[in-house]
Structures are given as structure tokens and as C-alpha cells.
Amino acid sequence: MLPIIIEAAINFCLHQIRLPYDLLSASAKKRTLLAYIDFETKDGEMHRAYIGCDEMLIQSIAEIFLGEEDSDEETLSDMLLETTNMIVGNAKVLAGELYETAMTISTPFILSDEECATLQLDELQCIGINGGEMTIGLQRL
């Protein structure tokens, strides 16, 4: 499932925010705002997808969508929730159309700093986007 979510994140870079991206082999370990969204595949498997953005990237996304050059923490959190929804929503469409794998998704939630510190992911990919960084993770539930 992670490759489908990565493909959706690349679509987000190309078609939504129109910024250059690079797949990274390792994270720069920056402070990252992190959101998750649960989804279930047609065979009943439960997963949790994580989308995280460092402050520079989520602020750039907020500027693109909202025109805000200096957003507060609440606005950045809301923008991350919407970004997570857009990426995983596109992954749902891709899964159904290209891979014949139906999935249902839930509502996204923000993780606290404490939850981020103890997070254990099954799979992880980082994407460099215009000087910022997006983290995409997957956890089987």
C-alpha cells in the first residue's frame, strides 16, 4: 500500500502544489507535524497512513492554498489535515482504478509531539519538496 500512497503524494506535488520533489533515502530529522488517517482494504486489512511535513513545507503549502505567508500553529495543523486527506483520498482512487484494490478511509487526526516520539512505523518514505520535507509512513493495525 505504501507505493500507492507515495504515488498519490507525487501527484500532490505535481498537480496540487506544483513544486519539484525528490525521493529521499533518509530523513533530515527536522521537527515534523504529523497526521494520520486509518483505512481498510477490501479484504479487511486495517492500516494507518501517516503524512508529516516539516514547518517550512507545511507553511509553503498554506501559502499556496491560503495565501498566508506566516500561518499560526492551528492553521498549519488544519492545512496538514487537508493535505493528508487529499493525498490518501487520491491513493484511494488510484488503488481502485489502477490496482483494483478498494479501500475505505476515515477522518485524519493530528498526532501530539509525545505520540510522534514513540511512533513505530512498518514502512517509511521521505520526499524532499522545494527545500522542505514530507514523511509518508504506514502502520498495519
Image: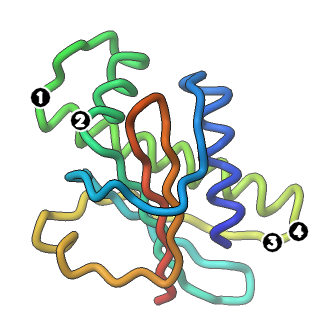
Given contact means CB atoms under 8 Å apart, are the residues at marks 2 and 4 in contact?
no
Task: Say what amino acid the circle numbered 1 marks.
Answer: Asp
Alpha-carbon distance for marks 1 and 4? Answer: 40 Å
Alpha-carbon distance for marks 3 and 2? Answer: 32 Å
| Mark 4, other Cα within 10 Å: few <14 / some 14–19 / many ≥20 | few
Given contact means CB atoms under 8 Å apart, are the residues at marks 1 and 2 in contact?
yes
Nearest to the eye among marks 2 and 4: give it: 2
Q: Residue at x 67, y 72 (%)?
A: 1
Return the x and y of residue 123 as percentages of the image width and height: 53, 77
Q: Is residue 67 above or below residue 17?
A: above
Q: Residue at x 23, y 35 (%)?
A: 76
Return the x and y of residue 88 as percentages of the image width and height: 57, 55
The label shown at residue 100 is 4
Nearest to the eye among marks 3 and 2: give it: 2
Query: Which one is nearer the viewer's eye here, 99 or 22?
Result: 22
Alpha-carbon distance for marks 3 and 1? Answer: 38 Å
Q: Name which quarter of the figure residue 10 lies in.
A: top right
Q: Name which quarter of the figure residue 6 lies in.
A: bottom right
Task: Say what amino acid the circle numbered 4 marks.
Answer: Glu
The label shown at residue 101 is 3
**Which type of secondary structure does the marked residue at label 2 adopt?**
helix
Sequence-wise, the earlier of marks 2 and 4 is 2
Q: Circle 1 is placed at which residue position?
A: 72
Q: Is residue 17 above or below residue 98?
A: above
Q: Residue at x 60, y 78 (%)?
A: 40
Query: Which one is nearer the viewer's eye here, 102 or 36?
Result: 36
Q: Is residue 133 above or below residue 69?
A: below
Task: Say what amino acid the circle numbered 3 marks.
Answer: Thr
